[in-house]
Image (cartoon, helix red, strand yellow):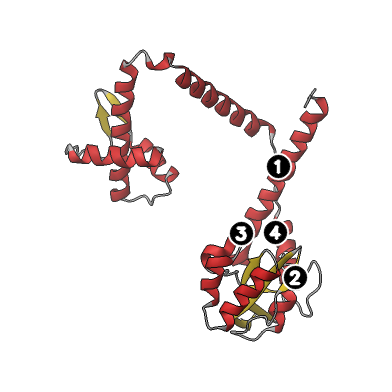
Amino acid sequence: MQPILSRLAAGVVLALGLHVGHAATVNGVTISGAAIVEAAKAAGLPDTPQSREVIKQQLIARELFRQEASKDKALEGRPEVQTQLREARNQILTQAWLKDRIKPEPVTDAQVRGRYNAIVASLGAMEYKARVIELADDAAADKALARIKAGEDFAKVAQDMSLAPTRASGGALDWVSFKVPAQEGRTQSLPLPLAEAISTLPAGGVSPSPVTWNARRYLVKVDALRPTQVPSYDAAAPGIRQALQAQALERATVALVTSLLTKAKITQ
């Protein structure tokens, strides 16, 4: 709702012909250039004159709305508004408290290097670009496979029938590499039966029969394969560091929750 209102507001302001510099005042209230830059960053926009202008118009409209809303003294008395104000206050206080209390361990360069080396060591000679269709049972799998054998595009069948989150992309997976023969726990998070099927198919090949895993049926196609392309440490390090930082944050959060649970009296 908020982005829609912002776009509408910006359109209204532009229609009124409000053309000002990189800062503005709205009935005496200042909108600073710094506020415009920060809002552009928060929206993920590049720092360009065009994006600053868009953000500025949105801030002008928002301030106009705020000023008009503040004149309606009955608004704060509405039960739904009171509820939203309490929820907003509680959320702000909770986030501030969590920021003070959750202190993840810093990720070291040695940890990033170690994780990079482990990833590189786990890669095989080839990497695969595959598609997967997840199906509920043998009947659905047989129906999907019959459509593919009849000449229908694998991606189209995936979009029509797959139960996997990759359905919208036609079952497409990212490039993946692992040592063959595939071994449990060493398949880059792929289920072992799927990794085994992928590693035995040629480019363009489709699994001749459904693969069974975790009570589901899967059809597999390999779109392409190529020698494994190992990214340099400098290219991979930022992503690895971010992943390790996320893991450290998760561990710190779990530790805090566990600590609070041990001291809390909870009835269910």
Q: Is residue 239 left or right of residue 259?
A: left
How far is mark 2 from mark 1, CA to CA? Answer: 40 Å
Amino acid carrying mark 1 in the image:
Pro
**Residue bearing mark 1:** 104
- Which secondary structure, mark 1? loop
Question: Quarter holding the C terminus?
Answer: top right
Amino acid carrying mark 4 in the image:
Val
- Which secondary structure, mark 4? helix
**Residue bearing mark 3:** 239
How far is mark 1 from mark 3, CA to CA? Answer: 18 Å
Number of other residues with Cα within 10 Å of mark 1, as a class: few under 14, some 14 to 19, many 20 or more: some
Whether residue 28 is visible, yes or no, is yes
Residue 138 in which image quadrant:
bottom right
Q: Residue 112: which numbered mark, if any?
A: 4
How far is mark 4 from mark 2, CA to CA? Answer: 36 Å
Considering every residue shown, the one lying at the far front of the view is 139
Number of other residues with Cα within 10 Å of mark 2, as a class: few under 14, some 14 to 19, many 20 or more: some
Which numbered disc flags the more N-terminal residue, 2 or 3?
Answer: 2
Which numbered disc flags the more N-terminal residue, 1 or 3?
Answer: 1
Contact, mark 1 vs mark 3 (Cβ under 8 Å): no
**Residue bearing mark 2:** 212
Contact, mark 2 vs mark 3 (Cβ under 8 Å): no
How far is mark 3 from mark 4, CA to CA? Answer: 9 Å
Amino acid carrying mark 2 in the image:
Thr
